[in-house]
Amino acid sequence: MRFLIKPFFAILVSLAFLPVQAEEVWPNHPVKFIVGFGPGGANDLVARVVAEGVSKQLNQTVIVENKPGAGSTLGADIVAKSAPDGYTFFVSAGGIITNPMIKSSMPYKEGDLVPVGLLTISPSIIVVSSDSKINSIKDLFAQAKTPKGINFSTAGTGSTPHFVAEMLSMKGGGKYEIIPYKSGSEGMVAVISNQVDATSEASVVVIPQIQGGKLKPIASTWSKRITALPNVPTAKEQGYPEIFIGHWAGVFAPKGTPDAILEKMNQAINAALKTTAVQSRLIPQGIEPAPGSRAVFTKFLGDEKARLEPIVRRSNMKED
């Protein structure tokens, strides 16, 4: 009997340590970053640059897969229903917060995805055509109060440009005709061709057109000026701190992913974002790296939700 007890006890001890050992060797095969948008967009660009940096930190391949659809909800749902083993992550945009606000139903619960880390912020830049007489937010407010009002293009209901338009309307009053396009790029082209008066898009989208003299920036909607557009004042500097939003990207994991893995991924993300290799590919395009702890990211998400939810209710935003 004594000889049987010892092996049995040894087995119990080894089993007790299996989860810890599994986390210690993570990752031992390729990790996936799921992007909820198609290739070539800002979210995809950030995911690929950061994935390359993270792979070097973890000494393991990080694969980016595009799963576009339903305003990024399809990709989020895939990750929410994935095994919580640390090998599938979701690279989100702001829709992960706003989609539940404007959609009548969601395929997953809010708690099914847990925050891992904030990646980047691309401030939204309010732009007009290069020959427009509008040179500031004050000028835009003045035109909104004329009989003509302002025609403002967006990338669809619940998009960041839509939120900017609603913020402008709530703060300055006047008449705003909000015109949804299929994408931010299409809305930007409408401004260049003078089909509409203004729009607001991610800095990475509008910077080439600003540099080419086709668009005129009148304000950045983030808390500070961005490196790539140092001469563009923020809305806050112009006296309108309420006009505040950015196109951001962050990483989420399925609920139940071991805490040790979440922490290790957060550390790898932060280390990657601080490298010259990553910064040199993002900052010139108007994308600001935003490393920070999981707690900081969680607070950021809570603040965004608390700030944007009243705008959704007041403007009665509903999915198209």
Image (tube, rainbow, N blue to C red):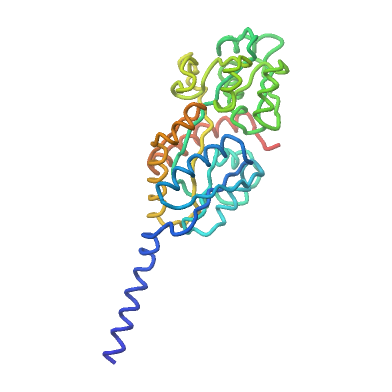
Residue that protrudes farthest toward the left in the picture:
2
Q: Residue placed at 31% from the left, 83% from the top?
A: 7
Q: Is residue 109 above or below residue 25?
A: above
Q: Quadrant of residue 295?
A: top left
Query: Where, quadrant-wise, is the C terminus in this rendering?
Result: top right
Q: Quadrant of residue 178?
A: top right
Where does the image place residue 156, in percent across and percent down from the top left? 67, 32
Q: Position of residue 296 (x, y in %)?
A: 39, 39
Residue 78 placement (x, y as % from top left): 59, 53
Instruction: Give 182 or 304, whichever is nearer the viewer.
Output: 182
Labels in figure, total = 0
**Viewer-side residue, 169 vs 276:** 276
Residue lying furthest bottom: 1
- What residue sits 37% from the left and 55% below the top? 260
What's the residue at 37%, 73% (across, down)? Answer: 15
Looking at the picture, does residue 278 appear above or below residue 113? Answer: above
Q: Furthest-right residue in view?
A: 195
Q: Which quadrant: the N terminus?
A: bottom left
Snapshot quadrant of residue 223? top left
Q: Is residue 318 left or right of residue 63?
A: right
Indicate the position of residue 226 as horizontal and vertical percent values.
46, 23
